[in-house]
Image (cartoon, coloured by chain):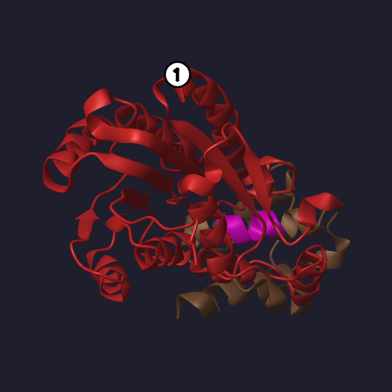
Chain colours: A red, B brown
Amino acid sequence: MINPLQLANKTILVTGASSGIGRATAVLLSQLGATIVAVGRNATRLEETIHTLEGSGHHAMVFDLGDLDAIPGWMAQIVDQAGPLDGLVHSAGVGSLAPLRVLSMTEVEQVMRINYFSAVALTKEFSRKRMHRKDGSIVLISSVAGVVGAAGRTAYSASKGALAAFARSAALELAGVGLRVNCIAPAYVRTEMYEATRGSLTDEQLSALVAAQPLGLGEPLDVAHAVAFLLAATGRWITGAVLAVDGGYTAQ
Amino acid sequence: MDTKAFCAKLDEVLDVPPGTVQPGQALDQIEGWDSVAVLAFIAMADTEYGVSVPAKEIPQCRTVDDLANLVLRQKA
């Protein structure tokens, strides 16, 4: 029997690991044999993630990715502690639901900073020679909102679309050094962020939203499986792709 | 809650001239009170009053005062 998804002896950094897709991804990758560097803002919730990981030797890193200038020094520290990285999963992100007439530029900047700018800084550091091992793989969690529009989602959509555009160019630039860069574009997944959005929608809007996903609402593990596929040897010939993991939402 | 300030915020939410929205006004008499305005109202309540207004309670609101009370209830 073979397991093409196995990640033994791989060290993988996962941002947004204290909840939702990031946490489910960290758990699955550990079950596939990887050592996880789990990154999150909330120490308590990050500790909870660490306790649910399989195996030992994982690292918990409490860090605010909004602090862009601190990312290079912090990444160097991680590599000093955990060794060079084999993978990077950027799942940290903030939501935003605000029509233009009430959208503040502060919110736009904050959303871009956490969802997109931090991904650039992380990819930039990961791509340095001493930071990664051969056949490194980067997976950025984008969104269907980066592919199709939605009223009230301008800031969020732009940040997620930026990730996909960034991944394509980074993929071409880094192919020569053997690094792959891909995006996953999930639709609504049952996470803390979804629960927060739920309150801002009426029952009608909510059922319309779920009806727009032919396979229904996604689970964090559905996305985590796709992340593992892109990180493992199974993704060897895939780079610059935006993989829809959306229950058929964008098939329409 | 400062009712005047609240009405001024609703002016922004509806993108109407300052002083348009008045206390006690019926929502169905306000032009532009549509689904985008509802989203804008929820976003405004979050940034200005620090509350998450449940969207499902908005259809029950008939007047500007009902909206103000909805925000106040979340604060309590």
Instruction: Give the residue type that dot 1 points to.
Output: Gly
**Residue A2, image x, y percentages:** 49, 62
**Residue B17, image x, y percentages:** 73, 41
Question: Is B19 placed above or below A240 here?
Answer: below
User: Dominant secondary structure of the magenta stretch?
Assistant: helix
Q: Chain of mark 1?
A: A
Q: Nearer the viewer, residue B20 or A180?
A: A180
Q: How busy is the neighbourhood of tag 1: few (under 14 within 10 Å), some, or many (20 plus)? A: few
Q: Is residue B45 left or right of residue A30?
A: right
* Element type at mark 1: helix
Question: Residue B44: within the magenta?
Answer: yes
Residue linked to disc 1: A176
- Farthest residue toward the front? A1
Q: Please give the range of residues in magenta.
A: B39-45
Question: Is B22 placed above or below A159 here?
Answer: below
**Residue A194, image x, y percentages:** 58, 66
Confirm whether residue A17 shows in the render: yes
Question: Is B45 placed above or below A110 here?
Answer: below
